[in-house]
Amino acid sequence: MRFLSCSMIYLFLVLQLQTLLVSSENIINGSIPVGESLTASESQQFSSSWRSPSGDFAFGFRKIQPNDGFTLSIWFDKIPDKTIVWHAQAVNTTTGLVPEGSKVTLTPDRGLVITDPRGQQHWISSLPPGSGSVSRGLITDAGNFRFLSKDSGEDLWLSFDHPTDTLLPTQVSQFSHDN
């Protein structure tokens, strides 16, 4: 009886470990397939995001007070104030923010596209001409959002190449070589 009990416990632990490893593999991969989207919603301010494998960074919409609008951002997700380290500057708005219900979608031909609830486009990531199509997106543990090429798997676009007001430790500013 004792042998059966130990065998059952061992089997349970092996199954739990296997489940944990499969879940970790998905998290470590951290890739976002083309066609995925996020919606700006006050009720899902922090839960509707794509997280880096470690969970240190998140990518999604953040509500900006007191303007009543949202910005597509990357932020430190493990600290209480969720400090923004990168954001897209929406066009066609006076504040640079988009309204609730706006959506960002990862597309194969244009990368990220933000549209408002009426379908008006407010921001698009600029892919280099002739660069090919996006196979997936990836939010890294360094806080960099990347698009990978369908053909070569190389980077087509990096949020690090489009800095806003914060530089992260592994990010090199395009202005640092202008001296």
Image: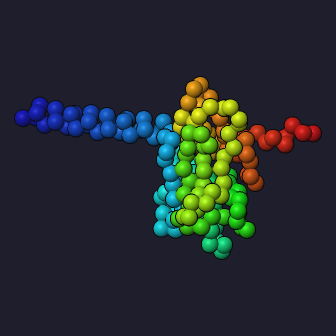
Residue 84, position in %: x, y?
A: 65, 57
Residue 150, position in %: x, y?
A: 56, 30
- Left or right: residue 9 versus residue 171 is left
Observer able to see residue 98: yes
- Which residue occupies 76% across, 54% down? 165
Quadrant where the C terminus sits is top right
- Which of these two is toward me, 11 or 89? 89
Q: How many labels were placed on the picture?
A: 0
- Residue occupying the far front of the picture: 119
- Which residue occupies 36% across, 36% down? 22
Residue 173, position in %: x, y?
A: 79, 42
- Left or right: residue 128 versus residue 51 is right
- Which of these two is toward me, 124 or 178? 124
Residue 53, position in %: x, y?
A: 51, 41
- Left or right: residue 42 versus residue 170 is left
- Left or right: residue 86 versus residue 19 is right
Quadrant where the N terminus sits is top left
- Residue occupying the far bottom of the picture: 66
Observer able to see residue 76: no
Q: Is residue 79 above or below residue 111?
A: below
